[in-house]
């Protein structure tokens, strides 16, 4: 990355205290921008227009990285489809509009892999984004985030507003949420395996059939990709951010059990949803446009995630 790009920037990062946000903040700090704003939800409710207007009045900004989102795994999406849709839609719409009105020079919109159609051919290519309806359990969230792409393209066409849209695949790594309701698949399975091991349980129950597949991107790689895009990419087309590595949930669960040291039985509950059947991205556009390629091997990233969570548990118990 070019240090000169960052030294003159006044950067505002929404969702800075979140999983991905904390890593993006750390990465931006390494490049010593002129200013770095990391507003919290307690300070500014991004679903309220007056609050977002006040945010930009108080923080003169040249570059926005919009990461704020209401997120969760399959269960959280099933329980809260309305709030996931409303809050994500309003945050994206209001933050981009007020950024435009405030004269922000560049806007990085970070969407989600959940915006893709349920039966997208693998590997997912950006051109397939509009070829069907998303997987039902997370469609409200995916469609709300997808509107950020529509808004970015419309604003570039009418106002010349330099907004880009990125589509990161499932993230994992240190700092992820291990809340039983809100967590995604990797922390949820780590939590199950660790608890079963500590209690001496002979088995764990996993959701679905195990036949669905996912792709995972280490969170530090994702942060690096976002910074590269902010610096080097300036087009209307959305861009996938991923590792290009596909693994079935069944194999993933076995790898996590091995990493944790759980040797019991894994029982699959087919009454629970699998979610989207397959997820794996074509990442060639990111490499061609701004030189991004994931660099963290999956098992290394998984080991670091398990180690971080174990150390967190030990600190909380002491």
Image: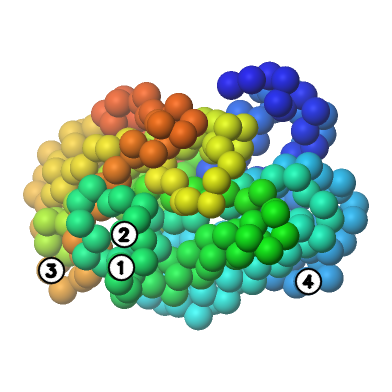
Q: Which mark is residue 128?
A: 2
Q: Residue at x 53, y 60 (%)?
A: 149
- The image quarter containing residue 190 is top left
Q: Are marks 1 and 3 in contact (CB under 8 Å)?
A: no
Mark 3 to mark 2 CA distance (whole Å): 29 Å
Q: Residue at x 90, y 52 (%)?
A: 58
Mark 1 against mark 3, which lies toward the viewer? 1
Q: Are marks 4 and 3 in contact (CB under 8 Å)?
A: no
| Relative height, residue 163 to residue 259 (above, below) | below
Q: Which residue is mark 3?
A: 270
Mark 1 against mark 4, which lies toward the viewer? 1
Q: Earlier in the sequence, mark 4 or mark 2?
A: 4
Q: Which residue is mark 1?
A: 131
Q: Quarter holding the N terminus? A: top right
Mark 4 to mark 3 CA distance (whole Å): 43 Å
| Element class at badge 3 | loop
Judge by depth and name the residue closer to the eye, 258 or 104: 104
Residue 161 appears left or right of 307: right
Measured as percent of width and height from the top left, residue 197 is found at 23, 42
Measured as percent of width and height from the top left, residue 49 is found at 78, 71
Label 3 packing within 10 angstroms: few (<14), some (14-19), many (20+): few
Q: Which mark is residue 49?
A: 4
């Amino acid at each position: 990355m070019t240090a000169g790009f960052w030294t003159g920037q006044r950067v505002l990062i929404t969702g800075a205290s979140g999983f991905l946000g904390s890593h993006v903040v750390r990465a931006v700090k390494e490049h010593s921008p002129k200013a770095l704003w990391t507003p919290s939800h307690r300070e500014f409710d991004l679903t309220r227009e007056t609050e977002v207007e006040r945010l930009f009045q108080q923080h003169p900004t040249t570059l926005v990285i919009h990461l704020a989102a209401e997120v969760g795994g399959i269960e959280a999406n099933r329980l809260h489809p309305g709030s996931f849709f409303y809050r994500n839609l309003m945050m994206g719409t209001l933050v981009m509009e007020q950024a435009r009105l405030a004269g922000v020079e560049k806007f990085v919109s970070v969407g989600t892999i959940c915006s893709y159609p349920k039966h997208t051919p693998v590997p997912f290519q950006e051109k397939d984004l509009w070829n069907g309806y998303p997987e039902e359990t997370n469609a409200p969230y995916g469609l709300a985030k997808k509107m950020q792409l529509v808004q970015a393209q419309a604003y570039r066409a009418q106002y010349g507003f330099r907004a880009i849209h990125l589509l990161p695949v499932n993230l994992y790594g240190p700092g992820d949420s291990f809340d039983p309701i809100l967590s995604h698949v990797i922390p949820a399975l780590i939590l199950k395996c660790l608890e079963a091991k500590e209690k001496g349980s002979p088995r764990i129950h996993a959701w679905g059939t195990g036949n669905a597949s996912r792709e995972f991107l280490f969170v530090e790689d994702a942060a690096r990709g976002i910074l590269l895009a902010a610096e080097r990419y300036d087009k209307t087309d959305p861009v996938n951010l991923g590792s290009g590595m596909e693994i079935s949930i069944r194999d993933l669960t076995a790898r996590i059990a091995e990493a944790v040291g759980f040797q019991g039985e894994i029982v699959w509950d087919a009454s629970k949803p699998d979610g989207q059947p397959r997820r794996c991205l074509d990442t060639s556009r990111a490499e061609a446009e701004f030189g991004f390629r994931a660099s963290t091997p999956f098992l290394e990233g998984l080991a670091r995630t398990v180690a971080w969570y174990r150390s967190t548990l030990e600190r909380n118990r002491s």
